[in-house]
Image (cartoon, coloured by chain):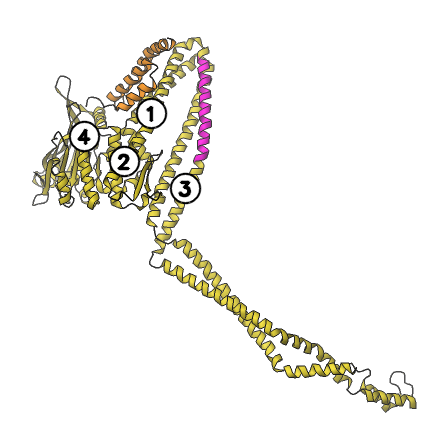
Chain colours: A orange, B yellow
Amino acid sequence: MSNLKINERIIEGIRENSKDNKVMQDFLIDLIYEEAEHLGTWWYKDIYKKRIDKCSEDWEENNEN
Amino acid sequence: MRIEKIILKNYRQFRQAKISFLRRNDSDLHYVIGTNGTGKTNILNAINWCLYNDEPHLSKDSQRLPVVNLQTIDKIGIGKDIEVAVEVWAETDDDAKVTFKRQAKFIKSDDGQIIHQGTKFELMTDDERGNTKIITGEEADGWVERFVPKSIREFFFFDGEQLDNYFKEATGQNIQHAVFQVSQIDLLENRVERKLQEILDDYTKDAGKMNPKIEIARAKLEQAQSQLNEVQKRIEECKKQIEISRIKIVEFADKLKGVPDIEALDQEKQLLLENFKNTKDLLKAKKIEKEGLLIECGSILMLWPAIEMATKVIEEKKTKRELPPPVDKGFLEDILRNESCSVCGRSLDERSNKRVHELLGEVEFSSETSQRLVQMENPLWQFKEKAESFDKQRKSTEGEITSLDKVLNGITQKISQIDSQMAGYKDEQIRDWYRERKKFEDIRDNNQLLLGGLLENRKVAESTVEEAKSELDNELKKEKKAKGLAKKVAFCTRALEIVRSTREAMMAEARERIEIETRKCFFGLVWKTATFKDIKILPDYSISLIHKMGYECMGSLSAGERELLALSFTLALHQASGFDSPILIDTPVARISGLNRENVAKVLCEVSTYKQIVLLLTPDEHSKDVSKIIDGRACGRYLLTLSSDENQAILEVL
């Protein structure tokens, strides 16, 4: 029980709804797993923002392509 | 996840006890049998106490007792410490072990009082290297939330007898909350979505600091969003009120089934009584009128021959021109006596004397008699007319009296019908029920009206938000310095859209799956399969059971049937969500009888092939029919009894 077992439908749903963009898909799935590890209160802003910094760049490139 | 064992130390009836739940490949069903008072329900309380630090299923007797075992209190010396502890040993899907442990310290004071010294909660698990790690505080609470979230524990650890109240107390919103938690829709909505939104707000605030136009657009969006949230909040409140009213209306309809509407009947009775009084007054007046008519016409009728005679005489006299007389008889006699005219004073000559004598011969009656006859004429005609119309009037009045009598009889009959309808019912209570039902019908109707307006407001608010978003987007694009932030804002906005559409799809899917599973399970459990047609989980998560005749029949369910429906819903929730935690049910079939009871036992056995099930049964519940079904399937069987001093539970493996 190191992590909360994620309901597979969430992952499937994210994949279905972001199938046009792998960067976005991975970003959201990573966030969900991250959340599953931190069920209580946690300082999420740094982690979220770091990922957004990185992924928004890749996402733009991906979008431009 | 499953419970491997529970260890209890000095907890209520359990001085020292260990209950192991070892599973078999084909089953994970366990049961404990105990008569009331042996501590069966306190096993359920012990788990709650360990995980959540409360005991929601305490009996009234237990509420008065300390959590510390009474035998321990007796045996321990003054000034000595007592430790109360409950450990829940859990196994995860990947075979990792975690032990939740709550300990409370007490001390026995000089006067024998038990004084609480403090409580500690911790959990033990193995780290990556296999070393035991002790976790406390918020992190430990987080682990409990992963095991069984506190807010939805009643779907995992519950009292079967209380399931009957489930649909009375739980609103659609509570059920929706449970579905969201168990299906982890909550993880998307309240964590990922909320946090992404907060970060998006941070970015736009940062951009606002670079350019006042961006700040204006941002503030506008913030305001539009807050208005939308406010409308949304009011919609939720409205829906909640409608749902509560709906449940209450069903509840009162249930109570009032076959019971007359005392208030309406009483109102009708009051109207009838008033009508009765008015009709009676009218009848009395008509009877007086008839009597008056008889009195008035009676004398006329008795004098009828005299009246006829008198009118005949007058007629004859008139024909003979004797009436009225041309000259007064006394006047003529005075002239003859005085031998002079009483008018001009001239002396009476022979010719005049002869003429006066002739006139006197013509005038037979005195003027007085003639006048009397003339005066009599009119009243005599009136009497005649009255006598002639008497019969008509009498018949009409008698007809009215007869019909009023009929009306009175009708009213009397109706009043006695109402009295017999109302007989045997407690007036005040029924009146209250009707009033309450009316009150909730009004609340429902008012809120439905309000909801219509709010939904329209929401549409407007949503389009305002969209406009504000696009305005902000344009301002961000215009500002070169904000290029980096604009990229992040666009990224977060898209991420939020994906999370929201995933959440919405999951919500619809979860509801549909729970509906299918609840239907499947309920029709497998209930023996009256021909009575019910369908089960619907409505968009607001209220549950509707449809009778084969097509009407909503939740209100007519028996307590046992309601329990079956609640159990079906609970099992469906587990099935549809894939949330893998154990189910522990106290007195699962106490209110269920006959074939339904056997069906519940069969379904629980079936569920135990993929989920841990622990049942706390009374000997009565563990009847021949039930034991035939579950004994072979159960991998753990315990008998719970009390020690001779009734202070300690004794657990025996069967």
The residue that mark 4 highlights is B610
Q: Is B521 in front, or is A10?
A: B521
Q: Amino acid at mark 2?
A: Thr
Separation of marks 3 and 1 at Cα, in angstroms: 31 Å
For image coordinates 46% across by 31% down, the residue present is: B456
Q: Chain of mark 1?
A: B
Q: Secondary structure at mark 4?
A: loop
> Which numbered mark, 4 or 1, is in the foreground of this view?
4
The residue that mark 1 highlights is B503
| Image quarter hosting the C terminus of chain B | top left
Separation of marks 3 and 2 at Cα, in angstroms: 30 Å
For image coordinates 32% across by 20% down, the residue present is: A16
Residue B72 falls within the magenta-colored stretch: no
* Whether label 3 touches label 2, CB < 8 Å: no
Q: Report whether residue B215 is seen.
A: no
Query: For residue B296, which quarter of the picture?
Result: bottom right
Horizontal side of residue B539 vs B104, given as left or right: right
Q: Secondary structure at mark 1?
A: helix
| Chain-order first, disc 4 or disc 2 | 2
| Chain-order first, disc 4 or disc 1 | 1
| Image quarter hosting the N terminus of chain B | top left
Q: Amino acid at mark 3?
A: Ile
For image coordinates 42% across by 30% down, the residue present is: B231
Q: Position of residue B157 (x, y in %)?
A: 21, 35
User: Which residue, as the protein is rendered here, is positioned at the far front?
Assistant: B530
Q: Is A11 in front, or is B442?
A: A11
Please tell me how crowded label 3 is: few (under 14), some (14-19), or many (20+) other residues with Cα within 10 Å.
some
Dot label at residue B443: 3
Q: Amino acid at mark 1?
A: Arg
Separation of marks 4 and 1 at Cα, in angstroms: 27 Å
